[in-house]
């Protein structure tokens, strides 16, 4: 079953990425904001990563949604499955500091998790978060995720948080 192409919340549109989002994504990748995902990146590296985000939808039938607020792209959220032998990773990021502090990431994550668990029947997702990324760790806990020390962490310096479908709160 494929994921919905678009989800909406009270304040956000979560949609598949568009070529017009590349400029905002490239600016995010070039900034210090990308440090928790092995950045900053050059423009060609940002293009390559963005192309992978778009292609993931075609190859897997699901992927990361662009978070749009009042039509402007402000981040991305959703599942990523680079290796089918491992459970999908659930990721999120806000592309600008201006988008922080409004609850956008929490709202977007809850909408996508509800879709994955309630509509698609997924049982769990895992998030690999840089140990120094306190904001993302706090968000994982707000979403009901629990530390998963048994998960195989693919990146050094990261910790795993698992969110299961049981007890879904929207």
Image (cartoon, rainbow, N blue to C red):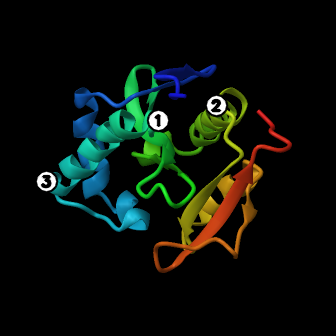
Measure how far apart labels 3 and 2 are at the Cα level.
34 Å
Q: Earlier in the sequence, mark 1 or mark 2?
A: 1
Q: Nearer the viewer, residue 37 or 120?
A: 120
The answer to whether 122 appears left or right of 16 in the picture is right
Q: Residues within 10 Å of mark 3 (few under 14, many from 20)?
A: few
Secondary structure of residue under mark 2: loop
What residue sits 40% from the left and 46% below the top? Answer: 96
Task: Find disc 3 in the rendering and name its residue.
Answer: 44
Residue 75: percent from left, percent from top: 43, 40
Horizontal side of 137 relative to 7 (left or right) equals right
Q: Which residue is mark 2?
A: 120
Residue at the image position 13 percent from the left and 53 percent from the top: 44
Residue for badge 1: 62
Q: Is residue 64 left or right of residue 145?
A: left
* Residue 41 as seen in the image, left or right of residue 56: left
> Which one is nearer the viewer's eye here, 100 or 37?
37
């Amino acid at each position: 079953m494929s994921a919905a192409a678009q989800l909406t919340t009270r304040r956000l549109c979560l949609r598949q990425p568009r070529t017009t989002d590349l400029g905002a994504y490239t600016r995010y990748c070039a900034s210090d904001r990308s440090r928790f995902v092995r950045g900053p990146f050059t423009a060609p590296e940002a293009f390559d990563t963005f192309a992978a985000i778009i292609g993931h939808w075609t190859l897997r039938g699901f992927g990361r949604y662009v978070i749009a607020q009042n039509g402007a792209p402000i981040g991305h959220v959703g599942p990523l499955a680079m290796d089918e032998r491992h459970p999908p990773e659930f990721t999120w990021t806000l592309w600008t500091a201006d988008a922080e502090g409004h609850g956008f990431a929490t709202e977007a994550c809850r909408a996508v998790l509800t879709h994955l668990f309630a509509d698609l029947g997924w049982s769990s997702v895992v998030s690999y978060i840089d140990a120094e990324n306190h904001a993302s760790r706090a968000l994982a806990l707000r979403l009901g995720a629990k530390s998963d020390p048994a998960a195989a962490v693919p990146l050094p310096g990261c910790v795993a948080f698992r969110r299961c479908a049981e007890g879904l709160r929207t």
